Image (tube, rainbow, N blue to C red):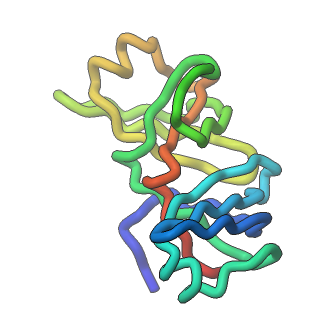
Amino acid sequence: MSLSIRNQLPGTVTTVTPGEAMATVRVRLTGGQDLTAAITRDAAQDLRLTPGTAVRALMKSTEVSLATAPIEGLSIRNQLPGRVTDLTAGEAMASVRVTVEGGELTAVITRDAAEDLALSPGTPVVALIKATDVSLTTA
């Protein structure tokens, strides 16, 4: 199956915490980082997610934010350190490729934000992704 979602990081489920309607799923990415996905309980059951299940974490590029340093006191669960490898800026928006341990992410942010952060190839960044913006598929 082909998808338009650029960001697809492989990993393995480490824990599944079911709630009444939603479940949180912790995934150990191939690069060693932990990622949290908040998906429906039904989806977790349909995918038969248990510790050890191989998955791909999917994140739309428009749902990836960037910071130039780790941020504390923030509800965003997923903070993946990386380095800018490419930046393409248009009139209004910029597409930023970031290499993280075990893969690559693309973030689409405003051109103003890219300029304010002084992003260029080689800049260290932290990719910020809300758990509710992470989808999972079995590998």
Quarter where residue 68 is shown: top right
Q: Residue at x 64, y 63 (%)?
A: 25
Which quadrant of the view contains residue 110? Answer: top left
State the image coordinates of residue 123 (x, y, percent, origin top left): 59, 20
Instruction: Judge left or right: residue 101 versus residue 92.
Output: right
**Image location of residue 132, percent across then percent down:** 45, 54
Residue in the picture at 82% in, 76% down = 52
* Residue 50 as seen in the image, left or right of residue 127: right
Rendered position, 88 above or below 41: above
Q: Which of these two is toward me, 94 or 26?
A: 26
Q: What residue occupies the far front of the structure in this picture?
A: 20
Rendered position, 30 above or below 3: above
Tag count: 0
Query: On the image, which quarter does residue 64 sit in?
Result: top left
Q: Nearer the viewer, residue 52 or 40?
A: 40
Q: Position of residue 136 (x, y in %)?
A: 55, 70
Coordinates of residue 92 in the picture (x, y in percent): 18, 29
Above-or-below relation of 36 to 124: below
Which residue is at 80% across, 73% downward? 51
- Placement of 125 over or under 26, stated as above or below: above
